[in-house]
Image (tube, rainbow, N blue to C red):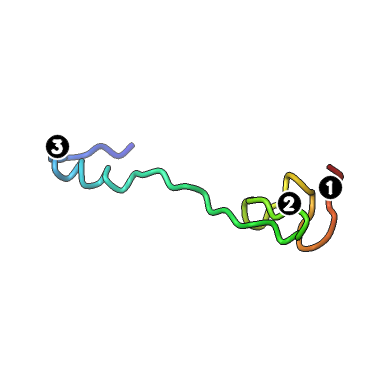
């Protein structure tokens, strides 16, 4: 197991931790004209059940 040889300074630790941030997920509108709700890209629309213009799941 890797063990650090020296103590990491407070400024180095904090500058490394500053990159840890939460990001809001990218949302796109459903291409179905009747629906138009926000959904994740490359995922079946949960409200109407279409994907790439085809009905994939019955809602």
Going 76% across and 62% down the picture, which residue do you hit? Answer: 52
How many residues crowd around disc 1 within 10 Å: few (fewer than 14), some, or many (20 or more)?
few
Question: What is the x, y in percent for residue 58?
Answer: 86, 45
Which of marks 3 and 1 precedes in the sequence?
Answer: 3
Dot in front, 3 or 2? 2
Position of residue 30 in the picture relative to residue 20 (left or right): right
Question: What is the x, y in percent for residue 39?
Answer: 64, 50
Is the C-beta separation of discs 3 and 2 under 8 Å? no
Question: What is the x, y in percent for residue 15?
Answer: 21, 47
Q: Secondary structure at mark 2?
A: loop
Going 84% across and 47% down the picture, which residue do you hit? Answer: 57
Q: CA distance from mark 2 to mark 1?
A: 8 Å
Q: Secondary structure at mark 1?
A: loop
Q: Which of the two residues, 39 or 36, is positioned nearer the viewer here?
A: 36
Q: CA distance from mark 1 to mark 3?
A: 55 Å
Is the C-beta separation of discs 2 and 1 under 8 Å? yes
Q: Which residue is mark 2?
A: 44
Q: Secondary structure at mark 3?
A: loop
Going 33% across and 36% down the picture, which residue do you hit? Answer: 1
With respect to residue 51, does 11 lie above or below?
Answer: above
Position of residue 25 in the picture relative to residue 34 (left or right): left
How many residues crowd around disc 3 within 10 Å: few (fewer than 14), some, or many (20 or more)?
few
Q: Which of the two residues, 9 or 48, is positioned nearer the viewer here?
A: 48
Position of residue 51 in the picture relative to residue 40 (left or right): right
């Amino acid at each position: 197991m890797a063990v650090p040889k020296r103590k990491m300074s407070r400024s180095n630790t904090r500058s490394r931790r500053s990159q840890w941030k939460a990001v809001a997920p990218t949302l796109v509108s459903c291409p179905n004209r009747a629906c138009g709700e926000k959904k994740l890209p490359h995922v079946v629309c949960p409200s109407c059940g279409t994907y790439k213009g085809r009905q994939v799941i019955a809602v």
